[in-house]
Amino acid sequence: MTETLAWETFRATDFARSPAFLQGNRLQCGQIGLTSALARSTVPSVPPKKPAAVNLLMRPPVTDLPATASPRDILARLVAFDTVSTNANLPLLQWSADWLAQSGVDAVVVEGGDPGKGGLYAHVGPRVDGGVLLSGHTDVVPVEGQSWDSDPFVLTEKAGRLYGRGTCDMKGFDALALWAIAAAARQGVRRPLQIALTRDEEIGCLGAPELIEAMRDAGLPKASAAIIGEPSEMRVVTGHKGNLGYLVKARGFEVHSSLMHTGVSAVMESARLIAWAHACNAENAVAPRSEVAALFDPPWTTLHAGTFQGGTAGNITALDAEFLFDFRFVPGDDIPTWIDRFMSRIAQIEAEMQAIRPGTGFTCEEQFNVPPLKPEVDGEAEALARRLTGDNGTHVVAYATEGGQYQDGGYSAVICGPGNIAQAHQPNEYLEISELERGEVFMRDLLKTLG
Ligand SMILES: [Zn+2]
């Protein structure tokens, strides 16, 4: 059976390009009133009109879903926003804020990053520390070059699965989190429930640090457990590696390659750095490992170059080369020492390049820096997630998440969310309906715990 609803065909990007959106976008942190009102005027697909501002501000929230909508209906709505990381995500956040407002949840949208982007947080329950935070990212990976059997931005049911970009990674969890906090507001909770929805996770976890800071600056009570709902098939994942990436650019000196001893090849000097990475990997593979490292596959820190461009001709020493270089750190590894080793190796090679031609060398631009999630001793988030799921296994994952950033921000954090990471980023990405249902059971049990 294929199900589509009329409003699902609305695309956030159409709206993001509209003058109304651009105007609304100038509003700053927390001032979502006018922006939201403008968003409302275009949902589902009506072009924005411009009535008097006073009317806009006084209008009650109008959304296309009732306050008591199911996680599945919310998921369908979220999937319909094309929030590929290159696009705006504010329309999705504004829709979410409006939908939550129907249940009396006062969500705060915090703009950050490129125009049209930001994060959202909300708090329900008493203004005290010790609540539970549900965290998800709102951006998704591109669909370009992938072959899909259905529109990736229309939630489509087939054979017990819900297809659509982001269903698994991770709008399924976002929908559950929105559903849960709305329900918490309507039923009332003694212990607080919070949600945090971020931008630009898929391009280096860029959004979580600013949202963590915004929540702190706003004096929001601190949750004692953060559940990061990346796909784990509702297993409790307590650790992942950290990921630090650089764009490395080499500048050489061009001569005819028959006289290469008088020039500097940016390609060949870069290759020395990559050869160093190989040597480090080989060393790491045989070095003694910690108990935490032993949980991972492979159980050591890895160094990797993922792309490489350079040179103009076979018989010219290359003037330029550039490559993406990254580390994946096992939790507990000494990251500052690794950075020192990397920079020292660059300095050594550079000195030899400059001995031949001054002005040659390397530049290094940090692209992302995602800290590892370290398994906690007696962590509150782990204990809570284990109670709710009944999962007592030991799980760590190879992919980086915002979990390490929440942990660095002082939260006890675990990963636990519906779906299998194998379906993430794929063409025909899907979430098993049974996974969404397990997620809903988790949220219902969480609400009882907070009751
Ligand atoms: Zn994700």
Image (cartoon, grey):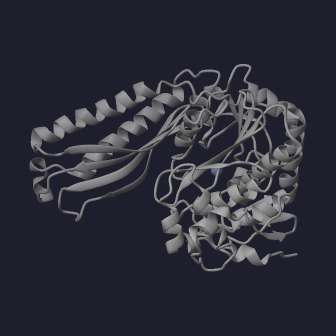
Percent of width and height locating residue 174: 72, 52
For residue 100, which quarter of the picture?
Answer: bottom right
- Is 376 above or below relative to 401? above
Q: Is residue 271 left or right of residue 111?
A: left
Comparing 172 with 296, the one in front is: 172
Comparing 155 with 312, the one in front is: 155
Percent of width and height locating residue 252: 18, 50
Tell me how many marks there are. 0
For residue 135, which quarter of the picture?
Answer: top right
- Name the residue at 11% across, 57% down: 255
- Is 424 above or below relative to 37? above
- Name the residue at 57% across, 65% down: 142
Comparing 279 with 300, the one in front is: 300
Q: Quadrant of the C terminus?
A: top right
- Name the residue at 77% across, 78% down: 6
Comparing 168 with 346, the one in front is: 168
* Res. 94 in view: yes
Percent of width and height locating residue 213: 54, 36
* Res. 392 in view: no
For residue 340, which quarter of the picture?
Answer: top left
Q: Quadrant of the N terminus?
A: bottom right
Percent of width and height locating residue 323: 36, 51
